[in-house]
């Protein structure tokens, strides 16, 4: 009987407990999800103007596209010019460090571009750039 009891104790000691490893994996997963920054696409492709001094901008999280017809697109949705500020405020609340990049078509109206820039600044985002091709 004593030998049988000793064998049971040895078998229990040999079992590997995977719970701590799974806890670490889930904590790392949650950490990466919370710290990841997601780029919101504008929703349309535009023909950007060329610029000799164009530089790549990192951490551009809020993309606003202006088509050649004057349509404004944010997050794959067409947006009225009066709703641009509210949309940018909402996206800024999701990512406070984000900047606004306006992807204006070559043939876009300058007045629409200025309205989008003003709406961005009114929403509290002062890091506003205009996309161009190198």
Image (cartoon, rainbow, N blue to C red):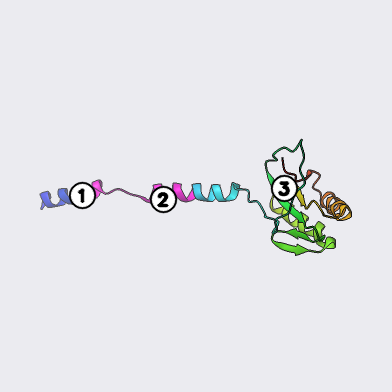
Residue at 50% over, 50% down: 29
Q: Secondary structure at mark 2?
A: helix
Q: Image point 70% across, 58% down: which residue?
A: 44
Q: Which residue is mark 1?
A: 11
Precedes in sequence: disc 1 or disc 2: 1
Magenta residue span: 12-27
Inspect the magenta stretch and tell me whether residue 24 lies in it.
yes
Question: In front: 47, or 38?
Answer: 47
Task: State the image coordinates of residue 8 (x, y, percent, origin top left).
Answer: 18, 51
Seen in the image, is 83 located left or right of residue 41?
right
Q: Residue at x 63, y 48 (%)?
A: 37
Which residue was labeled with disc 3? Answer: 96
**Camera-nearest residue between 27 and 54:** 54
Q: Position of residue 53 (x, y in %)?
A: 76, 35
Q: Is residue 91 left or right of residue 81?
A: left
Along the polypeptide, which appears first: circle 3 or circle 1?
Answer: 1
Distance, label 3 to label 1, CA atoms, is: 54 Å
């Amino acid at each position: 009987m004593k030998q049988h009891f000793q064998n049971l104790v040895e078998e229990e000691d040999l079992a590997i407990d995977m719970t701590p490893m799974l806890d670490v994996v889930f904590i790392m997963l949650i950490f990466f999800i919370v710290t990841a920054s997601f780029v919101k696409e504008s929703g349309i492709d535009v023909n950007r103007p060329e610029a000799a001094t164009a530089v790549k901008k990192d951490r551009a999280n809020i993309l606003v596209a202006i088509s050649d017809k004057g349509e404004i697109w944010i997050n794959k949705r067409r947006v009225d010019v009066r709703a641009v500020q509210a949309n940018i405020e909402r996206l800024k609340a999701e990512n406070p460090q984000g900047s606004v990049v306006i992807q204006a078509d070559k043939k876009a109206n300058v007045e629409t571009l200025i309205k989008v820039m003003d709406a961005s600044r009114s929403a509290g985002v002062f890091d506003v750039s205009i996309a161009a091709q190198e």
